[in-house]
Image (spheres, helix red, strand yellow):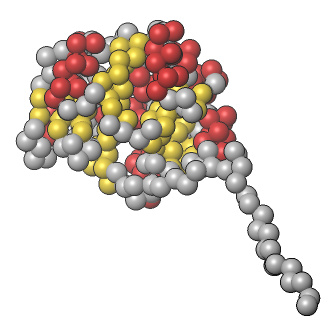
Amino acid sequence: MKATTPMVSVTPMTVSAADPAPRVATNRRYLMCEPRHFAVTYAINPWMDPSQPVDTELAVRQWRALAETYRRLGNDVLEIEPIEGLPDMVFAANGATVAKGRVYGAKFRYAERVPEGPAYLDWFRGAGYTETHAAQFVNEGEGDLLVAGSRLLAGTGFRTDPAAHVEAGAFLGLPVVTLELVDPRYYHLDTALCVLGPDEIAYFPGAFSPASQAVLRELYPDAIIATAADAAVLGLNGVSDGFHVVLPIEAVALAATLLARGYQPVPVSLSELRKAGGGPKCCTLELRS
Ligand code: ARG
């Protein structure tokens, strides 16, 4: 009797540590404010120099391209009317923090931006949001309060009062992780940390106190660590839908890392708004239902 050799088909396995995880985009709703009245007339962060020229028309064109990019990627973009005399109102991320349909209002640190808080809250009330809260403590919306999955990452050190972290967490029903910013160039959390997905972030460690760096290492051992060069072009001021990550065109190393991790970087140019210390995320307030 002839011995039968079992047929073994060998399929080469392609699993390796370098294989990116599959990423899924989910469509979002964003609130934005056209920079029709944008200018740099005061300096409340180190990026702002009122003696340098600003091209408002170019700012508007770049901003429209950003809004178009979001729409092309399948997101809804809503707009709030800009108000003359409020040149930073374009930075809609600072206008509120929205989660589970609840709106935690902003209360700005500097007098120049204080009227933006009520202006944004009025927009929400007019848009039919019924659960709104005018904050008791200073906070600059999603500039410092970033919803990351089931937690709220909350920055402090330059703008947002830590008491607002507690207030926001209680109102929005989210556990809060307080993070301390120490470099004045990265005065808002969204200039130093980007939420990519429910459990994934990118950040620049040098923007945080040693204790907060330890917290981030513990919570996000697989985080993308951005370079100083990426941070210095506001590369972390990006917007992720879970797959596409809209980020400043100058953040080349970060874009390459995102690609290697299975994300699709979508570079945009916002050179004019950067003169006020802002990037794509600053222009974008996510309306989470
Ligand atoms: N000039 C504005 C300020 O200093 C820029 C705000 C940028 N917004 C942001 N979400 N980081 O307040």
Q: Is residue 80 above or below residue 84?
A: below
Measuring from the top left, give residue 233's x and y in whole percent: 57, 26
Foreground residue, 113 or 239?
Answer: 239
Q: Is residue 151 left or right of residue 17?
A: left
Residue closest to the far left = 130
Q: Is residue 153 left or right of residue 22?
A: left
Measuring from the top left, give residue 188's x and y in whole percent: 40, 20
Q: Quadrant of residue 37?
A: top left
Quadrant containing the N terminus in the rendered view:
bottom right
Measuring from the top left, give residue 58's x and y in whole percent: 47, 38
Foreground residue, 161 or 73?
Answer: 161
Residue at image position (86%, 79%) is: 5
Foreground residue, 11 or 193?
Answer: 11
Tell me, yes or no, if residue 239 can be seen here: no
Residue at image position (89%, 84%) is: 3
Q: Is residue 103 above or below residue 77?
A: above
Q: Quadrant of residue 287?
A: top left
Residue closest to the far right = 2
**Total marks drawn?**
0
Residue at image position (32%, 54%) is: 76
Residue at image position (26%, 19%) is: 165
Measuring from the top left, give residue 88's x and y in whole percent: 33, 26
Tell me, yes or no, if residue 10 can be seen here: yes
Residue closest to the far front = 1
